[in-house]
Amino acid sequence: MSDYIPRKESIFHTWQETFIAYLLANLARFGLTTTLLDTLMALQAAWRDAWAAASNPETRTKAAIDTKDAALAAYKTGIRAFASEYLTYNHKVTVADRDNMGLPIHDTEPTPVPVPQTVPQCTVTMPVARRLAIAIGVAGHPRRKKEEGAHGTELRWVISETQPTSLDQFLHSEFVTHSPLVLDFDEGQRGKRIWFIARWENTRGQKGPWTEMFSAIIP
């Protein structure tokens, strides 16, 4: 099953508007309160402002793009956390509701899935200028792309000349279900160092241990 949150930013913007609007309209029926939505609504407001600034040629500066990227990463993380805690196995949320919100369809009775115990093996290559490809697999098993029971890999990254000292410094996040993940960069980012960290996540949202931090130079 592919990641339900769209990767393309313009599509994501439309998707999240539909998701939040439907959620607000059906909150009481889902047995939820508006207070539970406070954090998500704040993240949406930050994303809307950042998206508007970064999409307008008159205000599209490097700072605006960086702010937009950070807002996007935080918002996606917030959406996944909210859906996992309040929607995924909420019996009041119907299959039709999931379709309308753009959420995946899950079994009503969760099937036991092992919690990931290993770390993904990540290999970074530089196929062309301004592009990195991150291949993800299982250590010792070159043909296997995922650990048993894993839905995908949470990959975080940040451009920094010095090694991050905490997870909070990894401003960008991707949930990778197909390897390799390809990242494209601007001309001005060439020659800069980018740091990564990754971990498996199973189909129940349970996460394994983080890899050691690893880095590459943007070609």
Image (cartoon, rainbow, N blue to C red):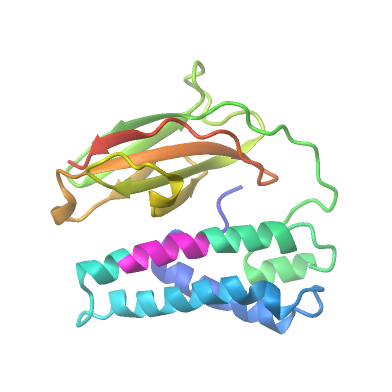
Left or right: where does residue 208 sit relative to residue 141?
right
For the point 55% across and 52% down, the residue is: 3
For the point 26% across and 81% down, the residue is: 56
Residue 42 against residue 202 in the figure, above or below: below
> Which one is in front, 115 or 150?
115
> Which one is in front, 164 or 217?
164
Count of labels in the image: 0
- Farthest residue in the top direction? 140
Of helix, strand and loop, which mostly describes the magenta segment? Answer: helix
Q: Quadrant of residue 29?
A: bottom right
Magenta region includes residue 69: yes
For the point 67% across and 43% down, the residue is: 203
- Farthest residue in the front direction? 165
For the point 80% across and 62% down, the residue is: 90
Q: Residue 162, image x and y in percent?
A: 25, 41
Magenta region includes residue 41: no
Q: Is residue 121 visible?
A: yes
Residue 143 against residue 154 in the figure, above or below: above
> Which one is in front, 84 or 146?
84
Q: Residue 47, image x and y in percent?
A: 43, 73
Residue 118 against residue 25 in the figure, above or below: above
Residue 166 against residue 124 in the figure, above or below: below
Left or right: where does residue 73 sit relative to residue 203?
left
> Which one is in front, 91 or 215?
215
Q: Residue 215, image x and y in percent?
A: 30, 35
- Look at the image and tell me in which quarter the C terminus lies: top left
Q: Which residues are magenta?
A: 67-76
Q: Residue 28, image x and y in percent?
A: 79, 80
Q: Is residue 170 visible?
A: no
